[in-house]
Image (cartoon, grey):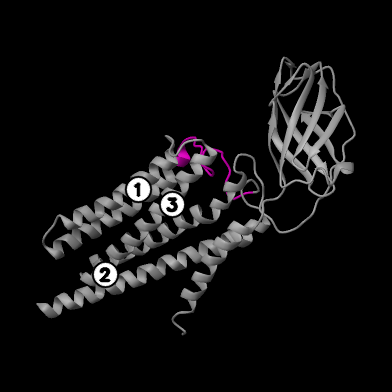
Amino acid sequence: MTHYWWKILSAILVVLAVVVGLKTPLSPGIPSTSPDRLNNGVTSVKITGYNTHFTEARESVSIWIENGDSRYCPYEVNVVSDTEIRATFSITGQIQEAFFDLYVANAIDGTLYLPSAFLQDGLEVVSDPNKTASCEISPQKGDESFNFPNQPILNETIRNLLYHVPSWFAMIFIMLISLIRSIQYLSGGNLVKDMGASAAAEVGLIFAFIGLATGSIWARFTWGAWWVNDPRLNGAAVAVLIYLAYFVLKSSVNDDAKAARLGAVYNIFAFVMMLVFVMVLPRMTDSLHPGVGGNPAFSQYDLDDNMRLVFYPAVLGWIGVSYWMYDIRERMSKLTFKKMALNE
C-alpha cells in the first residue's frame, strides 16, 4: 500500500478537478450589452446578466458607466428579469476615451464590471474634455459563496483551465523524464533506459494531444475558430511533430543499439526544441494566447482564490496520473525486453 498512495491521491485529485470544475457555478457577470455603442444624445441599451438576481434585488440595483475621469448614470432603468435590465443614457459633449466601462451593482450579486462595454458613436474624443458628468454610485458587496470567476469572453469556458493547462504541465514533466532516460542511456548504454525514454515520450504525446484538443475547443468558443495562426498554437503543433519524428527515426533503423543511440541524441534535441517552440519563441511576439505578448495569464484575470483551490491540485493530479501511466508503460517495455532476451 505504501507504494500506491501517490497513485490513489493523483486519481482523487483528477476526479476532484473534473467534478468540482464542472459543478461549481460561475459568479454573476455581465456577458453582453445591446447595442454596444452609445450615441451622442439619448441611447437605450439592454444589459444582459448571467447568474444574476436583478429582479430579486430590484430595490438595490444601480448602474453607471465610466469614461476616463467621467462617470454617467442612466436617467431611466427598467429591470425586466433576473438576467435583463434596460437602461437609457443621455450623453453629450466631449469625452476622454473611445470606450465606456459598465458597472452594475446590487445587494445580492455585488458590483459587476464589463470593461469596454460600449464604444462611442458620434461623440468627440479629446484629451481634456470641457465637461465632466457625475452621478451618485453605490458599489456593493454581494454573496461570497464558492464560485468561479465570470470573465468576459471566457464565461463558462473558463472551466477548461482546469484541464487544458494541467495537461501541458503533465506533458512537459513526462518529456523531461524521457530526456533523463535518454541521457542515462548515452551514459551507460543500457537499452532498458532507452525503452524508458520511448515509453515516456509515448505518454507525453498522449497528454500533448489532450492539450491540443482542449485548446482547440477553447479557441472555438472564445476566438470563433478551431485553430488560428498564432505563435503559441503553431509552436505546440511543431513540438508534437518533432516528437512524432522521434519515433519515425527509431523505427527506421534495424539495429537496436544504433536506433537507441540516434534516438537518445535526437530526444535531447527534441526536448530543447519543444521548449523553444512552446515557451521561448511565442514570448518574442504578440499572441492571442494568455501569457504571451502582454496578454496576462495566471493572474487576477484568469484565476481567483476559489479557482486556485482547484487548479493547483489539478496540476499535481494530472502530473501524478501521467507518471502512473509512464510507470505502467515502462514496466511493459521491461517485460518485453526480458522476453526477447529469453528467446535469444
- What mark, if any, has residue 193 been given in the picture? 2
Instruction: Using the rendered image of the protein, determine whether residue 83 is visible from the camera's viewpoint.
Output: yes
Give amino acid for label 1. Answer: Ala
Quadrant containing the C terminus is bottom left
Residue, disc 1:
239
Question: Is residue 192 within the magenta segment?
Answer: no
Q: Is residue 83 above or below residue 73?
A: below
| 159 or 139: nearer the viewer | 159
Mark 2 → mark 3, Cα distance in angstroms? 27 Å
Q: Is residue 196 above or below residue 156?
A: below
Secondary structure under badge 3? Answer: helix
Q: Is residue 279 above or below residue 255?
A: above
- Left or right for 27, reference 159: right
Circle count = 3
Residue, disc 3:
211
- Foreground label between 3 and 1: 3
- Foreground label between 2 and 3: 3
Give amino acid for label 3. Answer: Gly
Mark 2 → mark 1, Cα distance in angstroms? 23 Å
Q: Earlier in the sequence, mark 2 or mark 1?
A: 2
Question: Is residue 294 within the magenta segment?
Answer: yes
Residue at left 24%, top 66%?
194
Q: Earlier in the sequence, mark 2 or mark 3?
A: 2
Mark 3 → mark 1, Cα distance in angstroms? 12 Å
Which range is magenta? 282-299
| Prevailing secondary structure of the magenta residues | loop
Secondary structure under badge 2? Answer: helix
Location of residue 283 in the rendering, given as x and y in whole percent from the top left corner: 47, 41
Residue at left 53%, top 44%?
291
Give amino acid for label 2. Answer: Lys
